[in-house]
Image (cartoon, rainbow, N blue to C red):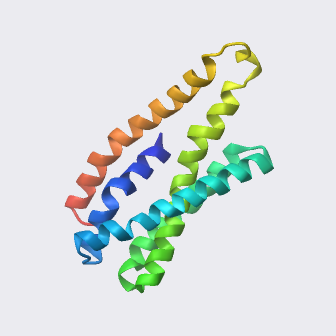
């Protein structure tokens, strides 16, 4: 639930943050925020590979989620002091760490849960499990936008 909420908070609010904090034009902020998405793309590939390799999507999710927390705080503190190249690299890394848990939970974990021995023979199980996981995540997304809006009104 929280990983999807965090992902959507970045997806919808990152251009506004870049515009407000780094004083970028709306066009530049929108373009630069794409780097976050590229990090998420690579994170999804890496997270899926690591989940297969270690046979534990939960460990992979925890690693990336725990890495995301300090990276977000460090980026917030240092973003105004970084060069544009370092800002891009930082956003890539944050995107990778924020998006990977969301990608792994909604795909790898859903498939693994749908293949549980208790659900064998039930053709609707995988879809039901994926829907339940994504639906719970949507609750986090519903909460994240108003929360970020409230926080941004008192300052980043």
Measuring from the top left, give residue 137's x and y in whole percent: 46, 37
Res. 19 image quadrant: bottom left
Question: Which residue is rendered at x = 57% and y = 53% of the image?
Answer: 100
Seen at 66% across and 57% down, the residue is: 46
Q: Is residue 129 above or below residue 65?
A: above
Does residue 104 sit above or below 63 in this rendering? above
Residue 69 can be seen in this image: no
At 65% across and 39% down in the image, what residue appears?
Answer: 108
Which quadrant of the view contains residue 35?
Answer: bottom left
Which residue is at the far left? Answer: 153
- Residue at image position (79%, 49%) is 54
Q: Is residue 105 visible?
A: yes
Q: Up-down: is 128 above or below 8? A: above
- Quarter of the image for residue 20 reads bottom left
Q: Which image quarter holds the C terminus?
A: bottom left
Q: Is residue 88 left or right of residue 45?
A: left
- Give whichever of 4, 84 is nearer the camera: 84
- Residue 55 in percent (x, y) is at 78, 44
Q: How many marks?
A: 0
Residue 90 in the image: state x and y as whole percent: 49, 73
Q: Nearer the viewer, residue 130 or 41?
A: 41
Residue 70 point in image, percent of width and height? 52, 66
Q: Is residue 127 left or right of residue 144?
A: right
Could you tell whether 42 is left or right of 50 in the image? left
């Amino acid at each position: 639930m929280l990983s999807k909420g965090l992902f959507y908070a970045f997806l919808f609010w990152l251009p506004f943050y870049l515009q407000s904090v780094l004083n970028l034009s709306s066009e530049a902020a929108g373009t630069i925020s794409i780097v976050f998405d590229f990090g998420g793309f690579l994170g999804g590939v890496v997270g899926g590979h690591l989940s297969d390799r270690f046979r534990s999507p939960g460990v992979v999710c925890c690693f990336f989620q725990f890495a995301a927390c300090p990276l977000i705080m460090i980026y917030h503190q240092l973003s105004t002091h970084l060069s544009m190249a370092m800002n891009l690299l930082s956003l890539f890394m944050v995107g990778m760490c924020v998006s990977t848990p969301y990608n792994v939970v909604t795909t790898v974990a859903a498939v693994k849960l749908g293949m549980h021995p208790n659900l064998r023979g039930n053709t609707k199980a995988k879809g039901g499990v994926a829907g339940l996981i994504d639906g719970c995540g949507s609750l986090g997304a519903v909460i994240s936008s108003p929360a970020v809006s409230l926080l941004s009104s008192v300052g980043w």
